[in-house]
Each structure stands twice: as C-alpha cells, then as structure tokens.
Amino acid sequence: STLIHYELILSAMRQFTSGEGLRVLDAGCGLGAGLMWFETNGPKSFDLVGHTISSSQLNFINNLPQHKFEAFLKSYDDLEAYGDDSSGIRALDVIYSIEAFIHSPDEEHTLKQWAKALADQGLVILVDDFLAVGVDKDAEDIQIQIFAKSWMANVLHTTSSLTEVAERHNLKLVLDRDLGSEYNINKWNYGNKFPDMAPTKRKSHQGWLGSKMRQRLMIEGKLTYRLVVFQKQGGVESPNISKNRQSTQENNTGLVEEGECSEVQTIAENKQPLVFEEIVPEHRTGKGSGGGSKMKCISGWYCCGMGETWWENLDANRTDTTSYLKLDKSLFGDYMEKVVEHLNKFYRTLPEGTVGKFLDIGGTGNVAKGMRKVTSKFSHFAGPFDYWLLDSDSAAKGVENALHCDMADCKEAPTCGFDVTFSHTVLEHTHRPWDTLDTIARITKKGGLTAHVVPFSYQYHATPDDNFRFSHRGVTTLLEDRGFTILDVGYDICTKPDKVLRERIDEHFDTIWLVYVIAQKN
C-alpha cells in the first residue's frame, strides 16, 4: 500500500541520516498525501516541500486541513533555488519520488539537477518500476514499447544501468530492495494472473492500457518494483546527515566505499605464485578433519552431474520445440566440477605468502531439525585459506573459526573479511535471500570469489524452513545488483540411484535440479 511506501522511505532516511531536521522534497507530490503523512508521522523537525506540475493538484493541496509543508507549481527538475547562496534557501537533504521518476523526459538532466540541489551525503530515494536484468529497453519488444508509450514510462532502466547514469553526477548506489519480491506483489496485487486485455467502453483509455501492460510485464518477470537509494558524494555539508554517515562503509546493499574495502592480492611482476594443493571435485562427509571421508554422491538419495547428459538426451529425442522453454547447452554442467574449477583458477592468481579466509555459510547443518552436525564438509574447498563456518544453528556455538548469527543480519561478520564466500543449498532457507546476499556482498573482499549452489526444482525441506527456489536468471540478478561479475552459472541435474528407486519411497523427487553460480566482486 502507499502507507508502506512512506514507512520504507522514512526508514531509509533514518538509516543514512540523523533522521532529524531534514529538508525533504517530494518530487511529484500529487495530492500531497506523502507530505501530509510525513508531517504527521515523521519528526516534527522535518522541513517538507513538494513540487507538482498540476494546478488542480496544487489547488487540492492548498485546501487540505492546516499544514506546515509547502507545495509549488513546479517541475521536479526546477531546483536551482535550493542551495543557492543568493536565494537563502538551504540545500535539500532528501529527494524522494514515488512512481514519478519513471515519467521524467530526461533522466540524465533530472539526476543532474537533483544532485546539484542536494547537500553532501544527501539522498535520492526512488520507489518505481525497473527493468529486470537482461531486458533490453531498446530491443524490438512490442510489449515494452506499448508499456512505455501508454504509461508514459520514459525512464526504463535496470538498477545497474541507472546507477551508471547516477554515478556521472556523484550519486552512489547505497540501497536496492526488490519490493516486488519482498511483498509478493504479483500475488497480492495481480493474483499471479495475466491481465484481461479486452477493452470495454469504460476500459479503453491510455491509463488503462498502461496499467494492464504493467501487470503483464510484472507477471512475465520483465519488470521489477524496487526501492533504490542513491547518496551524493561531495558538496555543501549538512549537519543533519553528517551525524550518521554509514552510507557506503556498511549498508544494506553490501556496497563498500572504494578504498575502504581490502582487496584480494594478485600476482605482480617478478612475484612467485602461491603453492597449494589443487582441490579435487569430491563430496565429503563433513565429519573429521579435511572434510571427512569421501562420498560417492551428494547424499544417500541423489547423485549429481547429469546436466549435460540430460540436455543431450533431450536434444537427440525431442518431439517439440517451444522457444521460451529452451535452455542453451552451455547452461548445463556438473556443479561440483564447476565450483572447483573456478576455485583452483582463483587460487592460482595469488602470490606467494598470501593468507586468507574461506567462509562456508550454513556449514554446520540444521541440527535443531535433526540433521547431523558437520564442521568441515567443504573445508577442502578452502585450499590455501583458513576455513571458517557461519550458521544460525546453535551447533555453531563453540566451534573453532565459526560465527553464530543469522546471515541476513550478521554484525559479527567483518566487512570485507573473506576472500571466498560459499554456500551449498542454504539460501533457499533464508526468509529474505536479498538481505543475506547484501551481507555476502559486504563481507566479501574486492576481487574475492563467491560461489553458491541453490535448488531450482526440489522437494520441500524445512530445515528449519524452506522459502525459495532460484533460476539462473534469478541468481544472476541478485549478484549483479550487488556488485558482482558472473563467472559461471548453470544447472546440474541429480537423480536417484537404481537401488534407491527400487527400495525407498517418500516425498523426495525422483529428479532434482540445482543451480550453481560463481561470481567475483568488482
């Protein structure tokens, strides 16, 4: 609801500023509902102002019950007076826009004007529609084109592409939340259904068409609904922000100010490479040192590494071809071999004398739900580095080199403290994987590696809970939005051995699909 918008924006203000005495602009203030809410529910010290280009809206605002905030008949680009010494009007601390920035005729100009009007460390807070990663606004996609024209959606960007524009004006991305996923908008707003596009006498106007195309693109995954925060670097200092400058040192995106984050060492000229014993792609029990004894398969239920075989069999015997179902052969592989390949390649880039840390997230197993406690299942992946565990299960308490915390909010994990971060069928258990990946981005060193194995098709398994499944596109988006470059991503397929098929029957699927992803922090 709109009230949730206001609460989220107020929360972002408090996260990155002192939360008091802020000069706040509602860019595209509509009927003044947001300004009225902040005046009523926010700190009394807020200095609130709104811009609208509608004289009807301004007349409505002027007839609202008594209020302190001001509204003007101006474009939200018309901000030259703010921070101008001759005007006597101080710079803005916050500019927020709810579903209005998308209508800007020129996002470059808008962000330039907003940046000029902001004090140092001032915020731009956007709640709006964004393109999903991989969707090209300039491609011949008729649905995107119809949406852009009917919704007057002049600004169609992914978070990454808009960040490139913002950075040209000293605006740094500090927060990116996928509200569509967090609040399950497709379910609650649209019932997970495509819209009825048949026009009627009452429903045939431009706004109706735009809203229907918006629904369709959301359901298809081409459009996302996000809260994005940029913070200005440089300019006139504001005492209302400088009291709480946590913007880029440590924040919910996991982004860290350049120069603050330690960087993984790499071989320079005339340097010898690090000598290490190369990792072998094999499963271990996790009991005892060095990962424990070898295991033939991932578990007693499944053996993996069937991805390429499945694809080749399908390709040789297919009877139908549906374009939107097809996956390229390059997206199939043995996840164990893929992860090990990239780890060995990464370790080979290290110079002699390098020391580092490898973090296994969820590395003890969910003992509270009956799983066996393990302490070294992937310790052989650490190679030349110290092996560390992180788990929210109480079994992690007292284990050497272990952090006991919830990965979504783990203050114990040091910023840029790990050269490699890794998880194996763990992220599906988190309530908000985007928060967990924020932490992973924060604690991974610049140039460091992150590798994860997650389920795509898998039976429900509440250890302690089971919340998400991921496609290769999903994990790509989650990591790229947090400053990682994808090195490898794809699917592995695991099947039951013949004996298990003959003798054991319960909820376990006969075939499961896993997604593997390996990425490097920029």
Image (cartoon, rainbow, N blue to C red):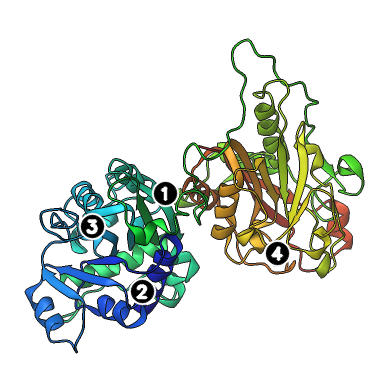
Q: Residue at x 45, y 59 (%)?
A: 244
Few, some or many residues within 10 Å of mark 1 (<14, 14–19, 20+) = many
First of labels 1, 4 by sequence position: 1
Which SS class for mark 4?
A: loop
Residue 107, given in percent of the width and then of the height, sits at 22, 50
First of labels 3, 1 by sequence position: 3
Residue 16, given in percent of the width and then of the height, sits at 43, 59
The kind of residue tagged 4 is Gln
The kind of residue tagged 2 is Tyr
In the image, which is nearer the foreground, mark 4 or mark 3?
A: 3
Alpha carbon distance from label 1 to label 2:
26 Å
Question: Does the rendering let one see residue 197?
Answer: no
Residue 225, given in percent of the width and then of the height, sits at 38, 63
In the image, which is nearer the foreground, mark 3 or mark 1?
A: 3
Q: Quadrant of residue 143?
A: bottom left
First of labels 4, 3 by sequence position: 3
Look at mark 2 in the image and give the residue it sits on. 6
Q: Residue at x 77, y 33 (%)?
A: 383
In the image, which is nearer the foreground, mark 3 or mark 2?
A: 3
Look at mark 3 in the image and give the residue it sits on. 91
Which SS class for mark 1?
A: loop
Quick check: 336 above or below 232? Answer: above
Quick check: 331 above or below 179? Answer: above
